[in-house]
C-alpha cells in the first residue's frame, strides 16, 4: 500500500507552497485522490514522484565560445 499525503505534507515534500500545489492540481499536472465530492484531497507517493519527473528538465551543455569575453549584442 502506498503512503497517502495531505495537501500540507505533499507541499512540504515537494518544497512548494500549498497554493502552488493546488494550482498544479487544478491544471491537471498532478494526480490526486478525493474520496467524496468537495472532500479532502490526498496525494499518493507515486503521484508526487510522477510530478517531480514531469518538472525535471535536462541541463543543456554550456555554449562553446571562441573567445573568453562575451560578445556584444547589437
Image (tube, rainbow, N blue to C red):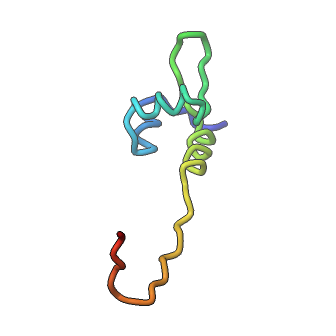
Q: Quadrant of residue 56?
A: bottom right
Q: Residue furthest front?
A: 74
* Residue at (54% x, 29% y) in the render: 25
Rendered view: 47 above or below 37 = below
Indicate left or right for 20 with 59 as reference: left
Dividing the picture into quadrants, the one containing residue 38 is top right
Identify the residue at horizontal 48%, vertical 78% (top origin): 63
Which residue is painted at 63% across and 38% down in the image? 2
Looking at the figure, which quarter contains the N terminus? top right
Give the percent coordinates (x, y) of residue 60: 53, 69
1, 43: nearer the viewer:
43
| Quadrant in the rendering for residue 30 | top right
Q: Residue 57: image x %, image y %?
A: 55, 58
Count of numbered badges drawn on the protein:
0
Seen from the viewer's position, the closer of residues 6 and 19 is: 19
Residue furthest right in the image? 1
Q: Nearer the viewer, residue 66 or 23?
A: 66
The relative height of residue 73 versus residue 15 in the rendered view (above or below) is below
| Residue at image point 46% right, 33% down | 21
- Image check: 18 left or right of 42? left
**Image quarter (top left, top right, bottom left or bottom right) of the C terminus:** bottom left
Percent x, y for residue 68? 35, 88
Residue 46, given in percent of the width and then of the height, sits at 63, 42
Amino acid at each position: 500500500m502506498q503512503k497517502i499525503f495531505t495537501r500540507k505534507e505533499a507541499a512540504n515534500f515537494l518544497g512548494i507552497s500549498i497554493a502552488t500545489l493546488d494550482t498544479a492540481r487544478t491544471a491537471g499536472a498532478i494526480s490526486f485522490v478525493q474520496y467524496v465530492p468537495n472532500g479532502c484531497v490526498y496525494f499518493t507517493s507515486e503521484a508526487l514522484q510522477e510530478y517531480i519527473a514531469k518538472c525535471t528538465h535536462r541541463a543543456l551543455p554550456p555554449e562553446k565560445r571562441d573567445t573568453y569575453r562575451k560578445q556584444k549584442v547589437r
